[in-house]
Each structure stands twice: as C-alpha cells, then as structure tokens.
Image (cartoon, coloured by chain):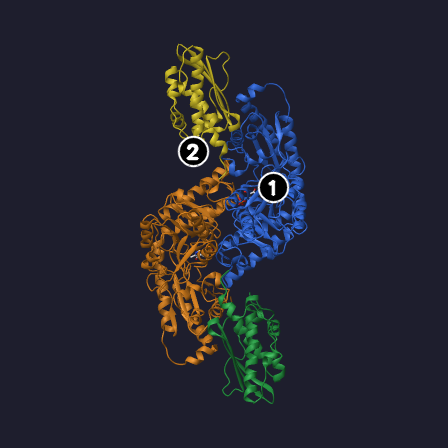
Chain colours: A yellow, B green, C orange, D blue
Amino acid sequence: MYSEKVMDHFSNPRNVGEIADASGVGEVGNAKCGDIMKIYLQIEDNIIKDVKFKTFGCGAAIATSSIATEMIKGKTVEEALELTNKAVVEALDGLPPAKIHCSVLAEEAVKAAIEDYMKKQGKEVKTSEYVGHEPNEEECCSKCERKCH
Amino acid sequence: MYSEKVMDHFSNPRNVGEIADASGVGEVGNAKCGDIMKIYLQIEDNIIKDVKFKTFGCGAAIATSSIATEMIKGKTVEEALELTNKAVVEALDGLPPAKIHCSVLAEEAVKAAIEDYMKKQGKEVKTSEYVGHEPNEEECCSKCERKCH
Amino acid sequence: MNGTRAIYMDHAATTYTKSEVLEEMLPFFKENFGNPSSIHKFGRDALKHVDIARVRVAKALGAEPSEIYFTAGGSEADNWAIKGAAYANKSKGNHIITTNFEHHALLHTCEYLEKEGFEVTYLPVDEHGLVSIEDVRNAITEKTILISIMYANNEIGTIQPIAEIGKLARDKGIYFHTDAVQAVGSVKIDVKEQNIDMLSLSAHKFYGPKGIGVLYVRKGIKLINFVHGGAQERGRRAGTENVPGIVGLGKAIELATENLEEQSKRLMNLRDRLINGVMEKIPYTRLNGHPVKRLPGNVNFSFQFIEGEALLLNLDMKGIAGSSGSACTSGSLDPSHVLLAIGLPHEIAHGSLRLTLGAVNTEEDIDYVLEVLPEIVYKLRQMSPLYEKVKGGNTNV
Amino acid sequence: MNGTRAIYMDHAATTYTKSEVLEEMLPFFKENFGNPSSIHKFGRDALKHVDIARVRVAKALGAEPSEIYFTAGGSEADNWAIKGAAYANKSKGNHIITTNFEHHALLHTCEYLEKEGFEVTYLPVDEHGLVSIEDVRNAITEKTILISIMYANNEIGTIQPIAEIGKLARDKGIYFHTDAVQAVGSVKIDVKEQNIDMLSLSAHKFYGPKGIGVLYVRKGIKLINFVHGGAQERGRRAGTENVPGIVGLGKAIELATENLEEQSKRLMNLRDRLINGVMEKIPYTRLNGHPVKRLPGNVNFSFQFIEGEALLLNLDMKGIAGSSGSACTSGSLDPSHVLLAIGLPHEIAHGSLRLTLGAVNTEEDIDYVLEVLPEIVYKLRQMSPLYEKVKGGNTNV
Ligand SMILES: Cc1ncc(COP(=O)(O)O)c(C=O)c1O
Ligand SMILES: Cc1ncc(COP(=O)(O)O)c(C=O)c1O
C-alpha cells in the first residue's frame, strides 16, 4: 500500500525532535481526527538552518512530515513557502488516495511555522496565498465522518 | 437418492410387457405430467395369474410399477385391492419425498386394472373405497405447476 | 456407476478445477492466508493476488480492473445486478425486460421484484431459443430501466445477439445486463464492443472453483449494494474475500480465454459428431437449440415417448453423466421451463437429455455414447405405453 | 517483514486453513467435483458430502441438520437473517433491536432497512462492551419483530449474555438472531439451550476456508430468500454449492468444537500473560473489553498519544501481525465505532491495537511481543506532540 520511499521515511524519520528556542513553530491537525503535526524552524538570514518535527498520526503522516522537513531545510523562507502537498506526494513516489490529506497537513504545518516566524519578526504574511493544495474532500472533518463502506 | 431396492427394480424391472387378451387393463397418469402407468392383468378363478406393465416415467415410476406387479401376482383380487402406496414405498425401502406420488400411481394403476376386470365381469366395484393413500400435495396437477425453488 | 467407465458430459452443470488452477490456489489456504483488508504483510500479500486476479478477469472481458467485483457465484451476481439496478433506478422507472427462458437466478429474482412493485416483461423466444431484437425494441417503454438477457442458454446452448441488444439498450439509455455464466470461456466476449453494462460469470463453469463469481459493472452504472457490511470490493460487496477462490477464478479465466478458439473448435467437432450420430441412429428425436448459434459443447435432445430421469439413470449405470434440463431441476418433476419456452409440448419436454462436452471428452467418449444411448432409448421405449401406440414410422421431429 | 520472524496475531481477521481441513477439501476440486444437484454419480457423491458437513455443523451447534443453510460467509448470513426476517414479518411490525457496536455486516444492513421504512434501535453498551438485558427489555415495543445481538465482539472480544437475551426474546415471541462469527470455535454454543432462532458463522474464523459460512435458521422461522434462483439448500439459498468450502467448514467446525475447552484454556493463559505484561511495561495504556467475559484469544489495548496504524506498521516491520480496530477499517482513517461505543474519546480510540491469538501462537511469541512492543510505543510517543505535553505521570487508564 505504501511506496518504499514512504516506508523509508516512516521507519527512519528525519529531523524528529524539537528546537528549544525556535524561530517559528507551527502546529496543525487535531487529535480527534487522528493526526497532529508540529514543526519547529530555526531561521537565520532568511535561511532555514534547522527544522524538526513531532507528529501524532499514521505512517503517511510521519513520512510526509519527515520528507517535508528535508525539502525545506537549507531553503529560503520564500522557497519554503512554495512547498506544495503535490510536491510532497511526488517526493514520496505517491500516496494512497485516502492518505493524500497527510501531505496537505505537512504543507500546512510548514506554512504555519513560517507564519509564526513572520509574526515574531513583526512581518504580516498571509501564507494562505501560498497554499498550493486543491480543495480536498478528504479534509479532516468530512474524514472523521467517513463510514466503513 | 434412491435405495438399492429401487435401483434394482428400475434397472431390472419385473413383468414388463403386455398381455394380449388381458382380463383387465388399467392406465393412470398423463404424459403432460411425465408419468403414465399401464397394468395388464390375467385373472383366473379370482386369482391374479399373470401381470404385466408398461410405464412412461422416471426411475421411481418404473420401480414402483415393477414392485407393485410383483406384490399382486398370485394374489386374489380382494387381496390385490388391499395394496396401498405405503406398502409399495416400504417394499422399496423408501422413496424420496418428491417421488411418493409414483407409489400412489402404482396403487391406482392396479386398482384401475381390477376395476376394468370387474366391469368386464359385469360386477360394479368402487375401487376408490379401497384407495389407501392419503391426500397428497404432490398430486399431478400441483406437481406440474411446481417451480424450481 | 457399474464398470470402470466414467464419462463426464455435464460440463454445463459444473466442471472440475484444473490442476494449474488448483495449484495457484493452494498457497492461499495455509501460507498466504491473510485477510486482504489487513495492513500487515499477510494482508498485503493477499491483496496483491486479489488484484492480480482482478486484472486477469478485466483482460478476459475487455473491461477495467476497477469494474470487476467478486461475488460468491453466478446467482449472487445475477441477484445483485437485477435487484441493485432496479432499486437504484426506481425513480426513473419500474420496468424490466428479460426473457422467459433465463436461468432461475434471473427469473426468480424478477418474480421477487414483481411482488415489490416492479413490472417485468418476459419476452418469448423462437423455436431455437433466439430472442428477437424487434421484440426487445417493442417492449421498451418510458419506464424501462433495465434489460437482462442471457448470453447463452444453459440448457440448449443458444447464443443471443448480445452486441445488437447492447447497442439498442445503449442508444435508449437503458442498462443492459447479461448472464454470461455459460458463455465465459466458450465464447469471445468484449464488454466494450458489445455495449454490456453488467455481466455475471461463475468460475466453476470454466474449470475454476465453485463458490466464486464476478459481476462486471461498467463505470458509472448506478447500483445499490446487495451484501452490506465491510468495505471490501471498494465498498460495494461486503465479506472477507475468498482469496483462494478469487485467485483460482483469475487463473481459470486466463486459461479459458487463452485457449478459447482452439478448444471451441475441438468441442464443436465432438458436438457435431454426437449430434449427427444420434439423429441418425435414434428415431423420434429432436435436437433442441439452434443448429449453429449454439455453445461449442452443448447437445440437447428430446427423445419422444420416454422420460428424462429414467434415461439419465440408465446412462449413469453405463458410466455416462448427463443431465435433463438444468441441474437445479434435474432432481425435480417439472419439465424444463426452457424447453417449454421453445414450444415443446410437456410430454416431449419430459424426455430431454443434455450432454455438455468439455476438456476431458474425446472421440472415443462420443463413440461410446453412440453405442450405448440408442440401446437405452430403445429399452425405455419398449417399456413405454406411449410408444406402443405409435408403432412404425421413423420421423425425427 | 524484515528478518525471519512472522508472528501472526490477527486470528480475529482470519485464520489459516488447517491441514486436516484442506486435506478433506482437496478431492472435491478435481475428482469428486460434481454438482450436488446432478442426479448422476458425480452429483450424488458431492451431495453426500454436503450432507455430512451439514450434520457436523448441526452437531456443533446443537441444531438439526435441516436447520443449517450454507452461505458465502458471515456477511451474507447476517444480511440474509436481518433482511429476510424483516421482510417476512413486516406485517407484524417494523422494529428491530440491535446494538451500536455490531459488525458492519449488521449495522449497514440495518441502516439500509431504515431507508426502507424499518425502525432500528441501536442499544448502547457499557464501558466493557456489555449490553444490558434491561435495555433490551425496555426497547421492545409492539412492533418489534427481531432482536440481533452479536455473540462476541470482533474488536474487543466481549461476550454477551446470549442465553438471557434469547430467553427474553422467546418469551416475548420475537425472533432472536446472533452474529456468532467470532464466537464459533471459541465458545460453547447450544442454539436450543440458548434460545437462538438464527445464528451466523463464517469458516475462516475457525481454521476453515474463506468464502463459506452458515446461517442457522430454527425450524418454523419465517424468512424470505436473499439469493434467489435454483432450488439449492431446500429452495432457500440459490447457487451451486461450494462443495470444497462446505466440506472444509464441516471439518473445521468439528475440529474446533472437539478441542474447544483445551484450546481456549491455552489461549486464555497466553492472553493473560500478554495483557499483564503490557499493562506492567507500558504506561498510559487501557485494556479495552471486559476483563473476564472476553474471547480466549482477544487482546485489545489503547495506547495514549500515538496512532494505531503507525503502531501496526512498526510491529509489522518486526514481524508481528496485528490489527487496529476491525479488519475492514484498519486501512481507513476512522476511529473504530466499537471503541467509540464503549466510550473512548476519539484520540484514544485512534491509538488502539488488537492482537488476537490462535493455534499457532506460543509463549515465546508473547515474550517477543513484550520485548518489542514497549520500544515501539516509546519511540512513537517520543515522536508525538501529544506526549510532550504530558511528561511524567504513569497512570494506566
Ligand atoms: C462479528 C463478525 N460478523 C461478521 C463478519 C463477516 O464475516 P465474513 O467476512 O466472513 O463475511 C465478521 C468478520 O469479518 C465478524 O467478525
Ligand atoms: C446461465 C446460468 N446463470 C446462473 C447460474 C448460477 O450460477 P451459480 O450456480 O454459480 O450461482 C448458472 C449455473 O448454475 C447458469 O447456468
């Protein structure tokens, strides 16, 4: 069901952890729906020097968190804002349809962390302008309602 | 599905044939329903000296005809009139429920032949008084209507 | 049976499971026994092979794998197709068209729906068992939501003009289902070319295992579920997948379609040898079904003046396994509804014999039947009060 | 999985087919492959073995052979029982009583019937998954025609007071069905003593093959047919009999009931060793289901702060096959409706693990799980933003 890439990132997740005095922290999702992602950024000179994550969620949630952190590490803030859920899915060699929402969460977690950083910097950014994912039926709330059939 | 007794009488039916100048002939059943039994009696001094049958019908129809002829051969007319379908079934070590009607036909064929003999003798006999079988749902007409379920 | 002969000529009732098929199935009982819904390795392995089978079925029918749904056999597939389409589309209409000589899985389902307020037209067939396109066209009303006509008849083997009926239905925007239980593995099928919306099949008719079948459902067809429950089969047919059965079905359909032309030519030769021999040797005999548009392995005769069961039992004692009417009625007392539908009088319908040839049959088998059958018919006729009335004459009907 | 370990602890999802069972099945694929409806020798042989299996099932349940109907599995049996009884008795009433934590084969069938005008009461269960007899009694109205309550739950293993419910239903003249798919082979059942009118079972849960099940229907119970068609199963369930499957089911149920006590004692020991070990070693853990009234092989935990699928995949990589919730949801995103029914909050329901023990499991397997599982839970908690918030504390819930 999962690609080898997903299994690799799931079983050896990169960048797990916290950053003590993070430049920005973003948390998305909720426990009721079964996934929460929290991303910590350390930004210097507009460059993402370090990034860590903590995730409560399924295999895909962990794998997307892991690969998303890798994809933005060393990038500028603006480059990181360009990250889309589609890019995450591609980097993982695909995800099962029911798990696409995890890639959306990963994208949103990165943006939330950057937003937090921006705010701390006194800049105002509507990261939602950058949100690259298409409206998705599998969003959390509908998801929690889904029945087994 | 059939007992050994049935298979024996079916594969080696006793008394198949006709009697040229029979004392009495009885035919029951109809082709539409898939079975016809015709019984020929040669009666001397009130004793059934010889009996033959011809049957169009299933294995049970042939076997019940065969055993019925054996059961009445050498008997008096009155004894033969006592033949019941139940006795036929027992003599064959049983019949499947759907085939019980064949034993009824055999009983009726014997009685019809005796009735014919009586008539020729100028005696009037209501053989139906002797008919020993119980009313049966599997009678021909309902039978032909039966559906495959 | 007595003696050592065992000649099986009842392939339309069921077939043995081929060795190659059984071999592919075996690992899924004890080793790869996982539930395909489980996410662990046992489950994923099973799921993979279910999907391989699905692809094989799709290929054999010219369908997409996503259009294949596994069921417990032909009867369930028929029930699902008819009830599922009827209830899903009852806002559009309540009228169903079928024929009067379908398999009971179709007929009894339709009778049930009649009690539930649906209207069903049972089209007649001609003396060879063919339905007329004109009749189908004329039966269509504004309320018609479904046409279901069997691909090939199980008793007399007649093959219907499926592509034409499919085109007619498609043009009118009416769903078209075909019960192809007897056709799959014997006739080339392409659901796209033939405009088939739904199709039923059953593995045990083409050397696969019993208890497993398929309903093909074209993408976009509205159908309510029949077996409700778990999310198996993309949420459309509940129940833990019969993995060995599915794997066997996949292999069997692949084998059957690979060898289709060759095998069907071989069977046609045997069939025609049997037909010609019997017609020559046994008077008062009728060949039921279409002379040409018939299944390669199907032979069906009516022998006047005798009754089918007695015939079958005699054949059985000689080691020949045949049937009289459909398997489901062959223990019963009714004349076959199929033979009545093609216009046979009851008394002639009672004397029918179906011999259906398959992979195991040889020319020697045919010759043996041609040796034994005339004697048996003769013996039973000698015993028959109907024959006595005829005497002489020698016309085949 | 990596390494060579392959520890299967998902017997509630499905079991392997035992060698003795498979061996009895094998002749019915290639040699005794006849259709039981055929009257020739091939058919009669098959029929004989179908009847032997029927007797074995009847014996295992304390029923009469004539009360046993073979189906394609537990789901079909459930669908048939519920829909069949509902439609056959709708003149008497339209009310059905069940629980909110049945298998989906029951729940989705009931939801379907609700759309068709039936009224369904879904009784709650307590924190251990037990339904209260008082609740059942209070739910009964004049219109109640059917009570269906599962014998043992597939996720948490809770065993219901079936005999009491049966008695209540019998006293009130209401049909009582029980889904015993998880109970058969694990618990002693007697349909007469327990006043059960209908009972569903499925062979692949007790070391028989997949794709075959039984609906027991007490004599006299009014039920309309579900699969319409041929006259198989005394005219009540159409479709060519899955003879190898039926033979396998017969053997499997015989084996399972023969060894029931011994096997269940063994499993309870393993189960309790596992439960005690885990509760001791892993904090923030809840045992779901009843401490005593539970299936001998069922273990179900919720581990706070982590998610079930991630847990399963990690176990799978260590060669341990378990499940999270029912098999049918284990690929899905929903928390199990069963765990919600016993009152778990969503976030805790998400972190559940079901390990179901069976014939192949040993003490070494348990010890291996006790070695591996705590590490995995620890690792996932370290990764969890929920755990971070807790710190310290060591209360099991
Ligand atoms: C309690 C219960 N009922 C019904 C079923 C359905 O049985 P099957 O999958 O064999 O149709 C299952 C298992 O899947 C079950 O555990
Ligand atoms: C034409 C036709 N339809 C449906 C069926 C039913 O298939 P099954 O017995 O596999 O359910 C059969 C065979 O029995 C058949 O010949």
Q: Chain of mark 2?
A: A
> How many marks can you see?
2
The residue labelled by disc 2 is A97
Q: Which mark is residue D277?
A: none
- Say whether residue B54 is left or right of residue D141: left
In this view of the protein, which residue sits in the foreground, A28 or C116?
Answer: C116
Dot 1 lies on which element?
Answer: loop
In this view of the protein, which residue sits in the foreground, B86 or C277?
Answer: B86
Looking at the rendered structure, the kind of residue marked 2 is Pro
Q: Chain of mark 1?
A: D
The residue labelled by disc 1 is D359
Q: Is residue B75 visible?
A: no
Question: Rounded to the nearest whole Å, what is the CA distance between mark 1 and mark 2?
Answer: 36 Å
Measured as percent of width and height from the top left, residue D250 is found at 58, 52
Dot 2 lies on which element?
Answer: helix
Looking at the rendered structure, the kind of residue marked 1 is Ala
Measured as percent of width and height from the top left, residue B136 is found at 57, 69
| Residue farthest front in this picture | D142
Measured as percent of width and height from the top left, residue C227 is found at 49, 46
